[in-house]
Image (cartoon, rainbow, N blue to C red):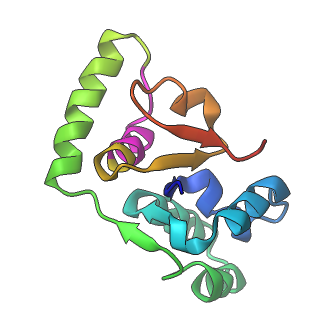
């Protein structure tokens, strides 16, 4: 049984006006017990909600996403791995956004597979197990 780290593109799907149904089906099929998310993804979702300022969307977040999954923090071990990964990605000339690298470092550190809709960026990360949940 695989254990997954849902990146922001998957974790935020229940809040989307037009969610990617295949991603929601994959999450349902995997089950919440096999899924985690990163504090990075929580922060990205909450940033969007704060920016939007829509009370109804906050209520939806609080009722269906907040505290739904185990949230993995970015600790010293993840930061150290992130630093190595970022240097390696630069040497490979395959630069990836820092927040995506933090999510990847969290997944690798915890032995998880990233579930994403962002295959373009996560496919560039050396040594990362990932799945495109749009397929």
Percent x, y of residue 82: 26, 38
Image quarter in which the C terminus is found: top right
The magenta stretch spans residue 99 = yes
Percent x, y of residue 131: 61, 41
Left or right of 127 in this view: 8: right
Up-down relation of residue 22 to residue 17 (above or below): above
Percent x, y of residue 80: 16, 41
Up-down relation of residue 58 to residue 97 (above or below): below
User: Which one is nearer the viewer's eye here, 19 or 24?
Assistant: 24
The magenta stretch spans residue 27 = no
User: Which one is nearer the viewer's eye here, 13 or 109?
Assistant: 109
Residue at image coords 42%, 21%: 95
Residue at image coords 48%, 37%: 129
Percent x, y of residue 130: 54, 39
Residue at image coords 39%, 28%: 127
Q: How many marks?
A: 0
Residue at image coords 45%, 41%: 100
Image quarter in which the N terminus is found: bottom right
Query: What secondary structure predominates along the stretch shown in magenta?
Result: helix
Up-down relation of residue 14 to residue 89 (above or below): below
Left or right of 51 in this view: 129: left
Q: Which residues are magenta?
A: 95-105
């Amino acid at each position: 049984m695989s254990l997954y780290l849902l990146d922001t593109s998957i974790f935020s799907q229940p809040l989307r006006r037009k969610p990617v149904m295949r991603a929601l089906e994959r999450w349902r099929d995997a089950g919440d017990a096999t899924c985690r998310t990163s504090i990075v993804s929580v922060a990205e979702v909450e940033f969007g909600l704060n920016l939007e300022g829509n009370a109804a969307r906050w209520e939806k977040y609080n009722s269906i996403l907040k505290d739904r999954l185990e949230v993995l923090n970015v600790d010293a071990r993840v930061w150290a791995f992130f630093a190595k990964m970022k240097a390696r990605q630069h040497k490979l000339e395959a630069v990836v956004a820092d927040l995506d690298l933090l999510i990847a470092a969290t997944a690798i550190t915890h032995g998880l597979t990233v579930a994403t809709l962002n295959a373009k960026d996560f496919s560039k990360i050396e040594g990362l197990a990932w799945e495109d949940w749009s397929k």
